[in-house]
Amino acid sequence: MDIDHLRSWIGREQSDAEVLTPMLVRQFNATFDRKGSTEEGDIAPLLIHFCLTQPVSPESELGPDGHPARGGFLPPVPLPRRMWAGGAFAFHGDIRIGERVERRSTIRDVVLKQGRSGPLCFVTVEHEITSGGKPALTERQDIVYRDAPAGEQTMPEGEAAPQGRHTRRITPTATLLFRYSAMTFNGHRIHYDIPYATEIEGYPGLIVHGPMQATLLCQTAADLRGTRPERFSFRSLSPIFDTADFTVNADDKAGAMRLWIARVGGPLAMEALAEW
């Protein structure tokens, strides 16, 4: 792997914009079983920006996994699996329905590390989001590339995660995963194509999206405190699949809230911290 070549992508920028429509907000609320006003000028749901200004590639430019072919904005990392490792947000203002939302993205770092299963390449992307020309949030996105393990993949094992003071149980239906993939224009087949996910990738089922998990955690924090946090960070620890229910959990702490997701009876899948 030519890490110097990959690091030449640092500083590369990309920007796009679109208007947040009331219809998308209705679809978003329906997917997450939420209620709220969808009139123009109203504050949009938290993290709906994941559904906006996403890359749009022709079918002919997609890889076999459904992702856009590499080597455009993102560096051409020669490892087959790409997943979200985590991220962080600093909120500056609100995204409002009916406004033009712009995302300016910059590659900030490319780092090669050695993990237990082989090489890992981490790509850090910074997104600056504006709504109606005003700053809305800054996002750090951590992407990890890794080799494909040999053989069938199994459910992560480990000590069962505790239940939080606040907890909610969710069934990750195929419809839920498909709807979120559609809203985010995410063609990654591990989220909706069962034969591909199980027979080609070797997973036990469909994988629950990292951004969707982060959205559930951030929504929970805002619902419990009655206001959105100023800062929110999260880290993926292990995948969860559509083969079992999972829980969204939260515990209060001084000036902040610790949150996590886990398969029922399973280990931590994602942990997060919300700060006000």
Image (cartoon, helix red, strand yellow):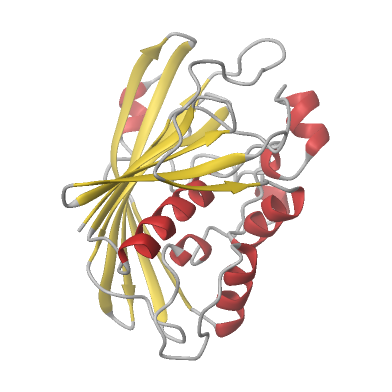
| Image quadrant assignment for residue 114 | top left
Q: Relative to 131, is 82 above or below?
A: above
Quadrant containing the C terminus in the rendered view:
bottom left
Does residue 125 show up? Answer: no
Q: Quadrant of the N terminus?
A: top left
User: Above or below — where is 15 with respect to 68?
Assistant: below
Residue, x 50% and y 27% (percent of image)? 238
Place residue 265 in its image quadrant.
top right
From where the camera sits, is residue 265 visible?
A: yes
Q: Nearer the viewer, residue 117 or 171?
A: 171
Residue drawn at x 44%, y 65% is: 49
In front: 156, or 113?
156
Residue 227 on image: x %, y %: 30, 69
In percent of width and height, residue 77 lies at 47, 29
Residue 127 shown left or right of residue 144 in the figure: left
**Residue at the image position 32 percent from the left and 75 percent from the top:** 94
Residue most extreme to the bottom: 40
Could you say which is closer to the camera, residue 124 or residue 159? 159
Q: Front-most of 73 and 31? A: 31
